[in-house]
Image: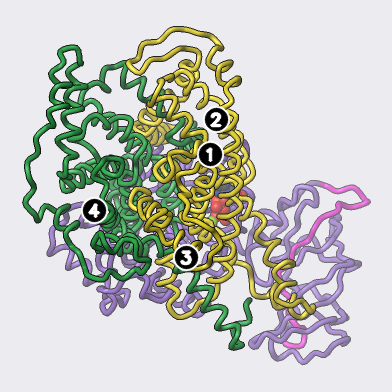
């Protein structure tokens, strides 16, 4: 296309690739660079730190001694005000105790892992069942379900935030810590289930039906055929779907902010990072280090999954 | 229906039951409940009073709403055009195998898989008026701007930063879709066109582009569908850019809370979205 | 061990019937071949026996059970699929013993059967490979092994050889015949290849458009087809169908008068008006002979002075075309026949092999 055989063609091609890769990677390089710089170095446009500063990472990973903080006197006064509802008080207290220098990154990461791994697991189980059903079993209503799943898949979270919040409020879940966490967990399952079903459904359709028939001829029931033949054959796709669902949960901010903002205990990484950023403790190196650490699991998953992602991911409308 | 067919159907229903239950309860029902809520004045604590069409009237007389629609339109226009063109360029550039293509592929996919939260601060830093490299480049090196500016601080310029961010993050998806079609265009067609005397540019317009119309339409439609609802990418990078989702979020959860109004916004937005989705299902999925 | 009976089986997909009422009785231990052109409903019929499809109406009986409501896994049936359907994630050995492992057959017995079968099918060297690393013929043998190790009541085959090249195909055909002789299980074999049908079958079912066109031994089907469809479908080259007129004393073909009383395969008895009865006459190319090498008897008829239009030497014999009653007729002649284009020769026909059909219904008369 670009006449790669000529020298200018080749140079042009190489330049274009270089430009593209730089454009893609520059923000990552910037994050990594700033996370390793000392404060005096921030204004320096060079990406290479003058000296490497690992303090931010050490602090986030709990390798330095964290000091216990007191709630400032002024805030304590507000908290002593008897008119203030109890949960508000707790929220304020929590905000101040958690934000003062102390950023329990490990805890947030654990929260994120619990929410996203948990939701991805359930989502994977349900989507295997659902996808198998709509792609392989014959029953009336199948087509309607299939289309509904696609429709639902494309309805974004913003359209649901008000009614979901109100529903949670109506049944009293949104006003308790565990209730909110439970809601969020369910929502993550809902957000990932259609994607999982969509990807797996397409994949199952590609497995020759004769294999299952052969299993049935070999004496397997439908269930056994699924477990002993279909699932082992789908392992790469199952891993991909799991990772994909995991990434969605890991990245989610909107609902976490709606349901968990007042419960710092349960903040997930996106929420915690955003809170950190708007707090007075916004120190670039710390934020960048936290960004790097949030990014790391995803990059690892991605490198692992990219081997499998060639087929299933490109067809149709993968979320994004 | 024979007993075996009935058993199969029963098994089928059993397997989808959890999915139907979950999706029905937490998506379809909320969508309808949302319509119901849009006729009420809704408090954050769940207290409601019926107000009829008042929310809609309020909405349609609210200039902020129209400016949100304007912002959203610009956002959609910029991101759809940008993503599609960049995706197309990437696909054309990377179509043929070369040494290191795997690495290049991984590098350009990275923005797509990275969590928004973990990259927005990097972007904020790039555009930071004091330390950011963008200001350094345009003010100190190129001298195009006379003074350092806070691009993200000003909603008008922030919109274009947000657009650029979305293009950066989602061009890889467009690239994948376009590439998968591009590699399936048979060589014969190019050779035939070459024999007919078309150069590279002629071949692009006479062979490549016609083959790509469909997938380009797919990309455009999908970008519209996903970006109409885009929240995190905008809110976290530049909370002052009020596209419709952010407008709705502010109505629902911050300042003077008016969840009924937010519900009304969502209803209208869902109607528009449904048209896009219907189009997608009808024309692209061909159902 | 089991006999199979199909009673008025009908299968519709949505509104279209693809199997239109099949009655069939297969005896215990018999090897029955379902043959017919593509799309005539062979696979559908076989899959209904297997339980992979459900008949819209009618009963399927295997052994002494009506199996309509019995799931495929509980019918004790083994099947060889057209594309083999080997489990790609299992080794050859695991593929073969999968069913036995499920049944918790003890290990010694599994090993015994495995070694017997892998020897019989020459699979010993391949046991640890994955299906992806096998050639087509090897995969086919694994599929056979997986089916026979079960020692099921019934074996089903859906075009098991259609993906092999012709040499391998004829080799495996022989193997399948041997296996059947050894185990003697009731077998139903689907193919569109009439050679497989003729060589393997105890009985052949010719299917046509969802109906059974004829059911009988290969010889019956070959010599006494009951309709033009079967007559032309079975046998290669296929049977000549020639316009003719039947009179009370003779059969007129283009002026040749074949004596009625010698046509021993024509059962038509009713008296015919003087203008005669329009019929279609069926004569297989094999039943023509060159007069130069065969003597005329009172059971033969001599088509004298036919003009040869085309000669196709086939090796052992040669096929020639000539014109008769406005149509082209093929004859298969001895290699020795020394004929050239345009030459006139005398052809003898075996009168007992001449068949006549109703031109409307295409049924035998
Ligand atoms: N699942 C199905 N749905 C609709 N029609 C089918 C299905 N399976 C087979 N058919 C139709 O039934 C007819 C018979 O098919 P089949 O039994 O496979 O023929 P064959 O004799 O070639 O094996 C064909 O016309 C085919 O199109
Ligand atoms: Mg078939």
**C-beta proximity under 8 Å, tags 3 and 4:** no
Q: Toward the viewer: C19 or C314?
A: C19
| Dot 3 alpha-carbon crowd within 10 angstroms: few under 14, some 14 to 19, many 20 or more | some
| Residue C198 at x, y percent in the picture | 53, 66
Please name the colour scheme applied to the rendered image: by chain
Marks 2 and 1 belong to one chain: yes
| Residue C321 at x, y percent in the picture | 80, 77
Q: Name the residue under label 4.
A: A286
Q: Magenta part of the protein: which range?
A: C271-293
Q: Name the residue under label 3.
A: B140
Residue lying at 52% horizontally and 40% vertically, measured from the top left: C9
Q: Toward the viewer: C186 or A129?
A: A129
Q: Toward the viewer: C190 or B186?
A: B186
Q: Name the residue under label 1.
A: B228
**C-beta proximity under 8 Å, tags 2 and 1:** yes
Q: Toward the viewer: C172 or A117?
A: A117
Q: Which chain is yellow?
A: B
In the rendering, what colour is chain A? green
- Per the rendering, the mark at residue B269 is 2
Tell whether circle 3 marks a residue whose Cβ is less than 8 angstroms from ligand 1.
Answer: no
Q: What element carries label 4?
A: helix
Q: What's the CA distance linking mark 3 and mark 1?
A: 37 Å
Q: Which chain carries label 4?
A: A
Residue lying at 25% horizontally and 73% vertically, measured from the top left: C128
Q: Which chain is purple?
A: C
Q: Mark 1 lies on which chain?
A: B
Q: Is mark 3 on a helix, strand or loop?
A: helix
Q: Which chain carries label 2?
A: B
Q: What's the CA distance linking mark 2 and mark 3?
A: 44 Å
| Residue A79 at x, y percent in the picture | 15, 21
């Amino acid at each position: 296309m670009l006449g790669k055989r000529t020298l200018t063609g080749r140079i042009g091609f190489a330049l274009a690739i270089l430009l593209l890769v730089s454009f893609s990677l520059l923000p990552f390089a910037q994050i990594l660079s700033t996370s390793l710089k000392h404060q005096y170095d921030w204004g320096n446009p060079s990406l290479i730190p003058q000296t490497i500063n690992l303090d931010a990472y050490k602090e986030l990973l709990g390798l330095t001694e964290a000091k216990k903080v007191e709630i400032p006197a002024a805030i304590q006064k507000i908290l002593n005000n008897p008119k203030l509802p109890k949960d508000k008080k707790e929220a304020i207290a929590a905000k101040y105790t958690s934000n003062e220098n102390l950023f329990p990154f490990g805890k947030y990461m654990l929260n994120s892992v619990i929410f996203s791994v948990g939701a991805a697991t359930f989502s994977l189980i349900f989507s295997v069942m659902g996808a198998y059903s709509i792609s392989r079993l014959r029953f009336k209503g199948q087509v309607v379900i299939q289309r509904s799943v696609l429709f639902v898949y494309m309805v974004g979270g913003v359209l649901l935030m008000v009614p979901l919040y109100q529903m949670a409020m109506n049944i009293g879940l949104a006003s308790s810590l565990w209730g909110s966490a439970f809601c969020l967990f369910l929502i993550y399952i809902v957000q990932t289930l259609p994607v999982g079903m969509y990807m797996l459904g397409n994949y199952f359709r590609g497995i020759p039906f004769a294999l299952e028939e052969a299993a049935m001829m070999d004496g397997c029931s439908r269930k056994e055929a699924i477990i002993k033949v279909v699932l082992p054959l789908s392992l790469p796709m199952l891993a991909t779907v799991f990772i994909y669902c995991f990434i969605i949960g890991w990245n989610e901010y909107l609902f976490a902010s709606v349901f968990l903002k007042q419960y710092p205990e349960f903040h997930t990484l996106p929420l915690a990072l955003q809170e950190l950023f708007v707090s007075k403790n916004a120190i670039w190196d710390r934020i960048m280090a936290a960004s790097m650490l949030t990014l790391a699991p995803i990059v690892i998953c991605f490198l692992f999954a990219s081997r499998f992602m060639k087929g299933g991911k490109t067809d149709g409308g993968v979320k994004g | 229906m024979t007993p075996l067919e009935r058993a199969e159907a029963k098994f089928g229903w059993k397997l989808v039951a959890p999915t139907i239950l979950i999706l029905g309860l937490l998506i379809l029902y909320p969508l309808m409940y949302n319509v119901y809520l849009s006729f009420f004045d809704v408090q954050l604590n769940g207290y409601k009073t019926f107000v009829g069409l008042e929310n809609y009237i309020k909405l349609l007389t609210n200039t902020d709403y129209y400016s949100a629609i304007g912002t959203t339109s610009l956002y959609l226009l910029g991101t759809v055009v940008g993503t599609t063109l960049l995706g197309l360029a990437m696909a054309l550039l990377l179509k043929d195998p070369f040494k290191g293509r795997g690495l290049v592929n991984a590098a350009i996919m990275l923005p797509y898989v990275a969590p928004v939260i973990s990259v927005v601060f990097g972007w904020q830093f790039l555009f930071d008026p004091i330390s950011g490299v963008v200001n350094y480049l345009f003010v100190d090196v190129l001298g195009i701007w006379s003074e350092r500016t806070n691009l993200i601080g000003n909603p008008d310029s922030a919109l274009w930063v947000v657009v650029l961010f979305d293009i950066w993050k989602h061009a890889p998806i467009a690239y994948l879709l376009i590439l998968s079609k591009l590699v399936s265009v048979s060589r014969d067609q190019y050779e035939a066109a070459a024999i007919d005397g078309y150069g590279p540019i002629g071949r692009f317009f006479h062979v490549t582009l016609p083959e790509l119309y469909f997938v380009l339409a797919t990309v455009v439609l999908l970008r519209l569908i996903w970006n109409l609802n885009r929240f995190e990418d905008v809110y976290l990078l530049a909370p002052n850019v009020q596209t419709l989702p952010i407008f709705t979020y502010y109505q629902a959860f911050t300042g003077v809370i008016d969840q009924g109004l937010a519900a009304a916004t969502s209803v209208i937005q869902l109607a528009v979205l449904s048209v896009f989705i219907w189009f997608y299902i009808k024309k692209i999925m061909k159902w | 061990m089991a006999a199979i009976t199909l009673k008025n089986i009908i299968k519709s997909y949505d509104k279209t019937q693809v199997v239109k009422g099949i009655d069939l009785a297969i005896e215990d231990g018999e090897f029955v071949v379902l043959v017919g052109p593509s799309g005539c409903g062979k696979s559908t019929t076989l899959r209904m026996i297997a339980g992979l499809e459900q008949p819209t109406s009618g009963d399927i009986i295997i052994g002494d059970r009506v199996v309509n409501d019995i799931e495929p896994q509980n019918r004790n049936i083994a099947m060889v699929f057209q594309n083999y359907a080997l489990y790609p994630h299992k080794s050859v050995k695991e593929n073969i013993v999968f069913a036995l492992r499920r049944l918790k057959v003890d290990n010694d017995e599994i090993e015994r059967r495995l070694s017997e079968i892998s020897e019989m099918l020459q699979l010993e060297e391949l046991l640890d490979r994955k299906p992806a690393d096998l050639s087509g013929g090897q995969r086919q043998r694994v599929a056979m092994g997986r089916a026979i190790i079960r020692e099921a009541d019934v074996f089903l085959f859906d075009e098991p050889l259609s993906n092999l090249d012709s040499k391998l195909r004829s080799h495996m055909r022989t193997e399948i015949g041997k296996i059947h002789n050894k185990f003697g299980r009731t077998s139903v074999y689907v193919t569109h290849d009439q050679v497989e049908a003729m060589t393997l079958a105890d009985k052949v079912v010719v299917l046509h458009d969802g109906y059974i066109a004829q059911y009988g031994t290969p010889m019956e089907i070959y010599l006494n087809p009951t309709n033009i469809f079967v007559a032309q479908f079975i046998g290669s080259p296929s049977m000549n169908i020639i316009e003719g007129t039947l009179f009370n004393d003779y059969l007129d073909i283009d002026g040749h008068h074949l004596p009625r009383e010698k046509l021993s395969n024509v059962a038509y008895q009713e008296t015919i008006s003087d203008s005669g009865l329009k019929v279609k006459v069926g004569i297989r190319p094999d039943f023509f002979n060159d007069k130069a090498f065969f003597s005329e008897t009172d059971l033969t008829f001599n088509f004298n002075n036919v003009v040869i239009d085309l000669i196709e030497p086939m090796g052992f014999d040669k096929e020639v075309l000539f014109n008769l009653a406005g149509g082209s007729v093929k004859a298969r002649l001895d290699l020795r026949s020394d004929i050239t284009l345009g030459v006139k020769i005398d052809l003898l026909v075996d009168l007992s092999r001449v068949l006549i059909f109703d031109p409307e219904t295409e049924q035998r008369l």
